[in-house]
Image (cartoon, helix red, strand yellow):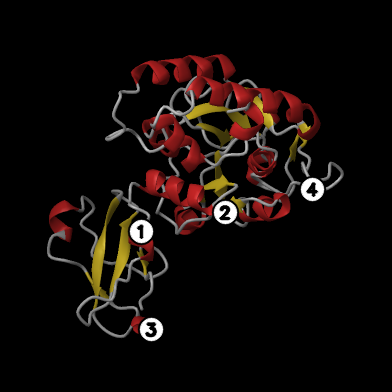
Amino acid sequence: MHSNELIQLGAADLARLIRSRDVDPVDVVDAHIAQIDRVNPRIKALVTVTFDRAREEARRIRDRIPDRTCDLPPLLGVPVTVKDALPVDGLRFTAGSAFYRNNVATKDAEAVRRIKEAGAIVLGKTSCSDMSASAETTNLIVGLTRNPWKLDHSAGGSSGGEAALIASCGSPLGLGADFGGSIRIPAAFCGVVGLKPTGGRIATDGHMPQTPDTVSEWNTVGPLARRVQDVALALSVLSKTPTMDIFRSIYVRGRYSCHVFCHRCQLTGRLQLLSKPRERRFEAPAWWDSVCRCRSRKLPWNRQAYYLGNT
């Protein structure tokens, strides 16, 4: 398969072809690196590269793929990029701020760890606005990130580097973060798919800057891609929850339930709805106190309980 065909495939299709040995993960990585070399000087989307490390990882994956494809990670060999507001172990970590120009991360963010665990190969870090505080992706380190469709137009922000690079086929999948539109705005501007998940669905550990506890659920990590199926696959990996669980009805035997997340001890579970959905009163299950380390049975609607809907 030619390199121009490889870079147009989505993450799910690439993963399937790599697992079946129809394409070489080294060829996939090389094709995306070549595309980045072509487009990045004009759009200024990728700020830190890990090309040598990515090629080495791709060769290791190629040598380890067995004859059978069962039990292989869902994103095995798929190139990804990461917004510079999330740390990647051993890479420069600036969050778009000149004050952190020479800062180097010493460990992965939890979301990065999960996507690596799923077999993805990190190609580099993408630009964001200074401390993700602007809807325009520009900072004093690399300057302005441009829209690949028209260079004199905005790529949006603050995850504009991710959206611009994915739209220009430099990456099939990326990690962004969203507080007040930082995934959704650049996704709309650059014509890609971006998702801001429910607060607490994906761990935000390591994100810079951190948000106060009172609004912590507003800041979320989420995927960007060119296809909806790739975003759904990434959500499944990042949240460690099968994606179909989101869409499946939770109206069972005449009862409503909701998904709950304890921000203190990272516990997730389902709660029984005692009354009509609009009244938003939930009962903690019997096992909650035995496993929730903070022993919190007080679950205010706007902090920890999220009603998912019903049929």
Is residue 119 at least partly visible in the picture? no
- The label on residue 179 is 2
Identified by mark 2, the residue type is Phe
Between marks 2 and 1 in the image, the one whose residue lies nearer the viewer:
1
Element type where label 3 sits in the image = helix
Disc 2 from disc 1: Cα separation: 25 Å
Q: With respect to residue 35, does 165 lie above or below?
A: below
Q: Earlier in the sequence, mark 2 or mark 3?
A: 2
Mark 3 and mark 1 residues within 8 Å of each other at the beta carbon:
no
Element type where label 1 sits in the image = helix
Disc 2 from disc 3: Cα separation: 26 Å
- The label on residue 244 is 1
Picture quarter with the C terminus = bottom left
Identified by mark 1, the residue type is Met
Disc 4 from disc 2: Cα separation: 19 Å
The residue at the point 33 percent across, 52 percent down is: 242
Q: Earlier in the sequence, mark 1 or mark 4?
A: 4
